[in-house]
Amino acid sequence: MIDIAAIEAAAARLEGVAVRTPLVRNDELDRVARGPVLVKTENLQAIGSFKIRGAYNLMCQLTAAEAARGVVAFSSGNHAQGVAMAGRLLGIHAAIVMPADAPRAKMDNTRRLGGEVITYDRYSGDREAIAREIAEERGAALVPSYDHEHIIAGQGTVGLEIAEQALEMQLPPDQVLINCGGGGLSAGSAVALQARLKTVSVRTVEPEDFDDTARSIAAGKRMTVAPGSRSICDSLLADSPGELPFAIHRTLFDAGLTVSDREVRDAMRFAFQNLKMVVEPGGAVSLAAVLSGRIETAGKTTAIVISGGNVDLDEFAAIQASAD
């Protein structure tokens, strides 16, 4: 299990690397929720998502010999950018296995940051197996998206910042909603939040057809998504929760929430029109849970995480123009 000391140590390593993103409020969001909503804006990170936190926390702890051999990761895009940026900052070559249909913005940004992109077919290939094979061939270190203690501790700095910033605002949250794919962000953040805010409730939020973490928490064992499942939330399409994140989820979480793709699109439009923010589909699920009433927010202080803002321009424009 990751403890608060590991997350505090990660925060020290990330000083000057990761942006301490604002925790903000919005009058219209508070009105809809009928209570204060604190929005953690991780879409304002240098790479447009929280993923630099875990990637850098792991990669800066590699030995000189490991760093010289480079790293390999697998990602739909946000972790790819985090690994590429950490590699550039640390002078480590980073190769990332990405689905061929990953958002163009994420693929282009990964290359711009110096990452070597290796594509595969999301629906027929096994990205982890491909990455492991490449890492073995090159003698490189593997940087997983979520199933590593250093990754979880790095992502947990989001929860640490939420707790610190909310206390500074004198608005400690009653509940925190965290977007969940493989579970590194939600698991690490829950450890930090419950260490600093003893009575806080933390919930995962997932796309409704990728509710593996919610079902796993309910079942007490790791579950997988149904074959052929689809969602616009490309950053949250893990087939099952990570082993290490789930060990934390089953201890610290009571239940998970899900939202539909339609609710996600509504949340993206709300964020642009009211928060003046560009939010990617996977980054909007916690906001969608509040706006759609998936959890009671009236008379409570709720914190949510906007985990990323990396979305292709055409897709974003189409969602803003639609009225579904």
Image (cartoon, rainbow, N blue to C red):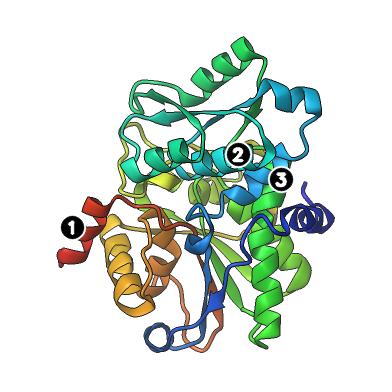
Q: Residue furthest top?
A: 137
Q: Residue at x 84, y 56 (%)?
A: 5
Kindly report the distance in space between the C-alpha atoms of the residues bearing marks 3 and 1.
Answer: 36 Å
Task: Tell whether 251 sits left or right of 237.
Answer: right
Task: Tell whether 88 sits left or right of 280.
Answer: right
Task: Tell whether 275 sits left or right of 193.
Answer: left
Residue 130's x, y, as percent?
A: 49, 18
Q: Disc number at residue 88?
A: 2
> Please, what secondary structure does the residue beneath circle 2 have?
helix
221 or 31: nearer the viewer: 31
Residue 14: quadrant of the picture:
bottom right
Q: What residue is shown with label 3?
A: 57
The amino acid marked with disc number 1 is Ala
Of labels 1 and 2, earlier in sequence is 2
Q: Residue 246, can we see it? A: no
Q: Disc number at residue 67?
A: none
Residue 170's x, y, as percent?
A: 67, 88
Q: Residue at x 57, y 47 (%)?
A: 183
Q: What residue is shown with label 1?
A: 318
The amino acid marked with disc number 3 is Asn
299 is higher (above) or lower (below) than 217: below
Circle nearer the viewer, 2 or 3: 2
Q: Residue furthest right?
A: 5
